Image (cartoon, rainbow, N blue to C red):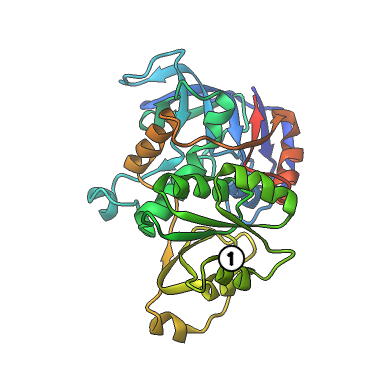
Amino acid sequence: MKAVYISRTHKLEYGEVKKPKPKGGEALIQVKACALNHLDLHVTKGVLDIPLPHIPGSDVAGIIEKINGNSNLKIGQEVIINPSIPCSECRQCNKGLDCEIVTIFGYKTPGGYAEYVTVPLEQVYPKPKNVSFIEAAAFPLTFLTAHHMLIRRANLQKNETVFIWGASGGLGSAGIQIAKYLGTKIIAATKTEEDAKKIKSIGADHIVVYSKENVVESVIRLTNNEKVDVVFESVGSETWNTSLAILRPHGRVVVAGTTSGAITSQDLSDIYYYQQTILGSRMGTKEEFEQVLKLVENSKLQPTIDSVFPLKEAHKALKKLEKSQHIGKIVLKI
């Protein structure tokens, strides 16, 4: 089969690889689409320590070709993958909570930059009929992560105000839609006025163009000096101090990424004085994935597609992702 893989010399290659065979309890899926994530950049750049060669890609939509085990799924069925694979053995899993050692599909397992993948049967779900393969590949990881951040971790409530960094990206645009579904006021940050127009159409109430205006001053003005209840943070060191500066007393910062760097410094005095909360977050549980899936099926959430590339041009797609030249998701068509 054809695949894009990271070679032992850390080069991104397109070529022929061995077609996988499903083990017991797995399905073989013909991949029709695979969306890109920043995790793919970390993997391809060698930031994360994984055995090579390796096929990246966490968000997959496709058609079942083989099933090895008992399942209600059918050969020929159009499906998607839940990329959050729990260990099913740790104390958190036994309590029905977030797995302590969750595996991300496509990180330490062969991923979706290929014509075929094998996947544990319990991670495979019927594709919503109201979305295409391209759209179906665009929502699992980002919408699950954003849902977990805003609902499970930050407990975002109707009529609260949320500030969303990285609004042009897949995670940020997913956060906007989930916050809009919850009935909250949304202030989103982006770099250019051109991006601002597109982000507004996704559902943001106000846009702060951080390359042209002071974020703290803009937030104070837009909230009548109240600041925000929740900051949706996935950028890291470049935005961290600003995130704390725009947070109101008893506010929450929820963090699920550090694309600009993970090392920062902060003044702890305001955090305890104003009783603010910092929350770590990552993907989500099986139950949360099923909640997201239902929202997509009911057209409450709609994946935002920026662009589509053929599999052999994955290197071009990754460059576009790295340069943040997109609104929503970049997807490989296979």
Rendered residue at 59%/49% (across/down) = 39
Rendered residue at 46%/32% (across/down) = 81
Q: Is residue 206 above or below residue 63?
A: below
Q: Is residue 141 above or below residue 277?
A: above
Q: Which residue is mark 1?
A: 236
Q: Is residue 138 above or below residue 39?
A: above
Please state which amino acid type lies under the numbered disc 1: Gly
Q: Position of residue 285 (x, y in %)?
A: 35, 45
Q: Bin the neighbour count of mark 1 within 10 Å (Cα to Cα): few under 14, some 14-19, many 20 and up.
A: many
Viewer-proximal residue among 330 and 11: 330
Viewer-proximal residue among 87 and 193: 193
Residue lying farthest front?
Answer: 224
Secondary structure at numbered mark 1: loop
Task: Name the side, left or right, on which 205 lies relative to 17.
Answer: left
Task: Name the side, left or right, on which 184 lies relative to 311.
Answer: left
Quadrant in the picture for residue 127 = top left
Is residue 44 in sight in this rendering? yes
Q: Is residue 75 above or below residue 94?
A: above
Classify the position of the C terminus by image quarter: top right
Rendered residue at 60%/52% (across/down) = 167
Classify the position of the N terminus by image quarter: top right
Q: Position of residue 219 (x, y in %)?
A: 57, 68
Q: Position of residue 169 (x, y in %)?
A: 62, 48
